[in-house]
Amino acid sequence: MEVVVRPTKPDTSWLAARLIAAAIKAKPQLVLGLATGRTMERLYAKLVQIHREERLDFSLVRTFNLDEYIGLPEEDENSYRYYMNHHLFDHINIDKRNTFLPDGMTDDEAGEGERYEAAIQEAGGIDLQLLGIGRAGHIGFNEPLSALQSRTRAKALTPLTIAENSGEFADPARIPRRAITMGVGTILEAKRLLVLVTGDSKAEILAKAIEGPITSMISATAIQLHRNVHVICDEEAAAGLSGREYYDWIFANEPEWEAYR
Ligand code: F6R
């Protein structure tokens, strides 16, 4: 794992967008795992900008989102399909038939999990998975006690997650109580993980995720098991990290970061 701390939120989105753009240029048919949430909004705006200004080509890219609320149709403005169209897909040259999210309106939740896993396999697996971390310690919607080998399935959201996300809903009481999410095991099979975390409200959970013991109580700690992880965070989110000096030293000295310093 490598942890890169940048001064501000815009600096983190710039770096994450640059890494994704480089991955797409290196492999135009990239299979990209996507996340939603406030942190990702700035990143998607940057990707749209790179597409417009530098013609970053998404025409062959395939995407798989981590999760979708159960019970919200695609046209609902709080569905993650709506979010993705609004923040990214409507503004780039991606073929929407190559963009996948779990079907939150399914009447066969178990079957939907299996179907989604099969679609990821059929695409050749996820090359690069983008992740945020919730204050409850989740990646995707893998709430506390999610098995570290879990697969795509329906999951109940914690009261903390519901409180965190209900602000996005015009009527906060309308927030679904459950979602379909890739499992921790599904996420760990991606070839590479890119974790983006910003803001002081995430400082405590980020320190636990990176430097704490691995536990299913905090599914984000599972990223420690992966062989190829980059965590990008801002100064505020980095406030609780004890290994900060070493992380900065790596960023300053490893040749792979030269183009991004
Ligand atoms: C959403 C997702 C979640 C978010 C996390 C952080 O697809 O997978 O794990 O990444 O809840 O959300 P924000 O950025 O809103 O704090």
Image (cartoon, helix red, strand yellow):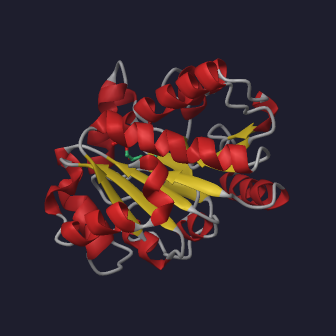
**Along the horizontal axis of the image, is 1 left or right of 137?**
right
Q: Where is residue 109 in the image (x, y as percent from the top left)?
A: 66, 52
Residue at x 52% of width, y 51% of height = 130
Ligand 1 is found in the corner quadrant, namely top left
| Residue found 59% across the figure and 20% down from its top | 53
Q: In this view, does 125 lie to the left or right of 151?
A: right
Residue 108 position within the rendered picture, expressed as x and y whole percent measured from the top left: 71, 50
Q: Residue at x 29, y 45 (%)?
A: 198
Q: Number of marks in the image?
A: 0
**Nearest to the observer: residue 197 or residue 184:** 197
Report x, y in % for residue 17.
51, 39
The vertical placement of 85 against 17, above or below, is above
Looking at this rendering, what residue extends furthest in the right direction? 122
Q: Is residue 107 visible?
A: no
Q: In this view, does 240 lie above or below 168?
A: below
Q: Is residue 169 left or right of residue 48?
A: left
**In which quarter of the view is residue 58 placed?**
top right
Q: 102 above or below 204?
A: above
Give the percent coordinates (x, y) of residue 65: 61, 45
For the N terminus, give its image quadrant.
bottom left
